[in-house]
Image: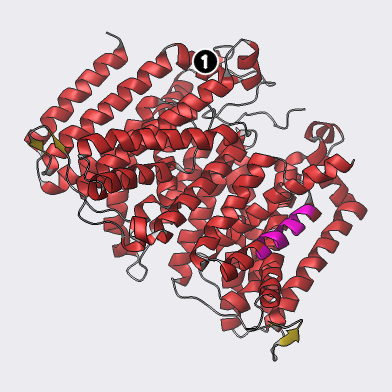
Amino acid sequence: MSRDGWGLVLLAAILAALPLVAATAYVLTLLNVIGLYVIVTVGLILLGCSGQVSLGQAAFYGLGAYASALLSRDLGWSPGLTIPAATLLVAAGAYLVGLPTLRLAEHFFVLATLAVGIIVNVLMVQMVPLTGGASGLRDIPPLQLGGLRFTSDLHYYYLIWALALLALAVARNITSHRTGRALRAILGSEVGAAALGVEVARYRMQVFVLSAAYAAVAGAVYAHYIRFISPSPFSLYASLFFLIMAVVGGLTNIWGGLFGAVAVTLLDQVVRAQLPRVFPRVGGEYQTAIYGILLVVIMIFFPSGIVRGTLDLRRALVRVPHRIGTARARSPDRRPGLGDSPRPADGGTP
Amino acid sequence: MVSLLPQLILTGLTVGSIYALVALGFVLIYNVTGILNFAQGEFSMLGALLCATLLGWHLSLPLAALVAVAAVCLIGAAMERLTIEPAFGSHPLTLIIITFGVSMAFRGLSLMIWGADPYTLPEFTPGPALQLLGGVLVRQAMWAIGLSIAVVLGLFLFFSRSVPGAAVRACADNAFACRLLGISPRRMSLVAFTLSAGLGAVAGIVIAPITGATYDMGLSLGLKGFVAAVIGGLTNAPAAVVGGYLVGLIESLTTGYLTPGYSGAITFLVLLLVLVIQREGLLHAAQRRQA
């Protein structure tokens, strides 16, 4: 088995044993939320591997939640069925969104996903008869698989982390095989990849639909876990939050999704608990200042994520002069990729 | 029933002129650096709130507005030096994410400094509203429309008649050739951010007497200005101004004739349509066909 494979097994063992050590309701809820974020973030990073960034990921997350909640609550389907159904629906929706927008150059694609995210959120608030508007949907039935009713945090803990591990394993397999090589080629140079016979558009679409499906699964499970949904956790801020997790982990590094989701969620807990003590006067979204600064600092100093960035930094400090000409050195005429460090020389290629 | 239409058009033109100013800021930065600056709307917010604070210190309105615009110009320059310059040459998406981070930081810090309550600015020339074509136009709206036109003219003169303006244009055209001629793209980037910040601040100060000023006004203002810039093709300043008025009109007409709640979505639906139909922008495409 490969190193990544052993890593997954080790992670699974740790996760299985974790509730035996720390099974308070707070810790379990926190771990469940982190697990859901891991799924979404890994999807976002898969997208990053194809050189795209989405600011509408919270919309897919929310659509998954709403679709599964409505199907189970209003049509009486079993949640065991509605979660995959919602995922398929959202994936189909993502395909339709992707058809016209994936042709766009990367920064226009960001805009398109931003627009989709805002439109979906407005619809969630405005379509009151269907979605319950800003006050949301209550009484969403809990998940039931065969005779097993998922009622406690612990049940959902095992479900969510099983899904998160599956998400990581699938993402790892995709990025370490043929598709992964194709994606890396696209990331390096779109034109170059196309010239070598990589079907850029097809791979982009597949990865985009998959990343939306990841978000939708997480959203659908979230709906049945919390059993109440409203539009606010699926706003533009949520999309930004997911982006921060992906950026902290490294936009092109699958394992970074795990690290980013854990680190940012824990940081969020600390910030929410400590900031009111420093600034008792203000309430609300003051923490955006910290996240904003975090985002800027990481993108400038660790564009490949905190973990890899720190490793690179250490390696660079240990043996400084002998790394010219290795695989990571960049020729001046190559456009820097997403997740690359800024070029030292004066930019502005002809 | 009295027709709503004239009133809606006047309102649309007023808001549209503000969007036009914000859109111009986007276009300026995009042209020179290729960066979509998502913090553009925050410059307006900073301008309006700084101006309100300065008024609280008993400065006269023109002086307060001038000082606020100058201060925001400095903030824009500082933003470029501290966040854009260190990442110069990075992937465009990296730079976009940085500007997102900056906008979040501005918003959060403003909340800490000014709190969540709205501030008001007095109208530049107080007086009764004007009756025009069956609608009502507040005097401040005249200022907004007039200033946006004046700024566009000023920018046009700057770019077409002055040497620094020509340098900025040259840089947008071909950064490599510029370096050969001794024009530093990095300096031009600084100029673009400074000017754009000033433009944003003017927009914020002009609209604040009508809408009030809050720490979170920048997000929606920035996004709308952004839609306007994209409609105009992102590189074409006059087209961006037209885009601004279009967005303003679309917004006010949909608010008037449809459920107001949906108007936020419609602007972005327009953005999506424009992106899909012609990614270089509608107006730009029309122009190219003529050429």
Chain of the residue that carries numbered disc 1 in the rendered image: A
Q: Residue at x 23, y 49 (%)?
A: A73
Q: Residue at x 31, y 16 (%)?
A: A4
Q: Which residue is mark 1?
A: A182
Vertical arrangement, residue A153 with respect to residue B207, above or below: above
> Which range of residues does the magenta coloring cover?
B239-249
In this rendering, the count of numbered labels is 1
The quarter of the rendered structure image containing the C terminus of chain A is top right
Visible residue check, residue B222: yes
Q: Is residue B52 magenta?
A: no
The quarter of the rendered structure image containing the N terminus of chain A is top left
> To which quarter of the image does residue B143 belong?
bottom right
Visible residue check, residue A309: no
Answer with left or right where residue B207 lies relative to residue B142. Answer: left
Q: Position of residue A189 (x, y in %)?
A: 62, 20
Residue B251 vs residue B110, the one in the foreground: B251
Local crowd at mark 1 within 10 Å, few (<14), some, or many (≥20)? Answer: many
Q: What kind of residue is marked 1?
A: Ala
| Main SS category, magenta section | helix
Circle 1 sits in a helix, a strand or a loop, which is it? helix
Q: Position of residue A327 (x, y in %)?
A: 54, 13
Residue at the limit of the structure toward the top, as seen here: A1
Residue at the limit of the structure toward the bottom, as seen here: B128
Answer with left or right where residue A323 lies relative to residue A176. Answer: right
> To which quarter of the image does residue B64 belong?
bottom right
Q: Residue at x 56, y 76 (%)?
A: B212
Residue B166 vs residue A197, the one in the foreground: A197
